[in-house]
Amino acid sequence: MQASLDGCLFVPVADAGPGQVGTGTRFDYRERDGRVWAHYEGGDVVHGELVGTRAGDQLDFRYVQLRTDGSTASGHCLSRVTALPDGRLRLEESWEWESQPGSGTSAVEQVRR
């Protein structure tokens, strides 16, 4: 059985760059019936939301965020859910901005509450 993301808190393992998520960003995930959503904030992000779907270990979602400089940005992300040796979850992400040029990969890991 796959581990649920519902109620999980995730943090990036590295900074992605100015105006993007970084190690100061926190993602609070929810999951129900194949749907996933999360609120995130911290670092250069004042307010962010993501919404999408989960099929097995694959997430497919869109995100939108308000940055500290007042700009907004949005994009698309595909993630793979994996388990770390200590039982925490890791999301390995491949993302692409839709509101501006740019794409990349990143990872976030679960933080125990």
Image (cartoon, helix red, strand yellow):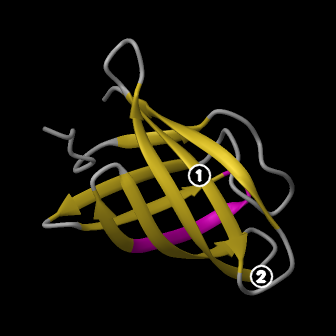
Q: Amino acid at mark 2?
A: Ser
Instruction: First in sequence, mark 1 or 2: give its number.
Output: 2
Is the magenta region chiefly helix, strand or loop?
strand
* Badge nearest the viewer, 1 or 2: 1
> Which residue lies under the disc numbered 1?
93
Question: How far across and how far down the image is residue 11, in percent?
Answer: 54, 39
**Relative to 17, is 78 above or below?**
below
Q: To which quarter of the image does residue 2 belong?
A: top left
The span picked out in magenta is 43-51
Q: Is residue 73 left or right of residue 31?
A: right
Mark 2: few/some/many CA within 10 Å (<14, 14-19, 20+): few
Q: To which quarter of the image does residue 54 belong?
A: bottom left
Residue 111 colored magenta?
A: no
**Relative to 47, is 20 above or below?**
above
Q: CA distance from mark 1 to mark 2?
A: 23 Å
Q: Amino acid at mark 1?
A: Glu
At 64% from the left edge and 57% from the top edge, which residue is drawn? 94
Query: In what quadrant of the picture does the C terminus appear?
Result: top left
Q: Is residue 52 left or right of residue 4?
A: right
At 21% from the left edge and 38% from the top edge, which residue is drawn? 3
Q: Is residue 8 left or right of residue 79?
A: left
Q: Secondary structure at mark 2?
A: loop
Question: How far across and how far down the image is residue 31, in percent?
Answer: 22, 59
> Which residue lies under the disc numbered 2?
71
Mark 1: few/some/many CA within 10 Å (<14, 14-19, 20+): some
Q: Secondary structure at mark 1?
A: strand
Q: Is residue 89 left or right of residue 68?
A: left
Q: To which quarter of the image does residue 29 belong?
A: bottom left
Determine whether label 1 and label 2 are within 8 Å by CB. no
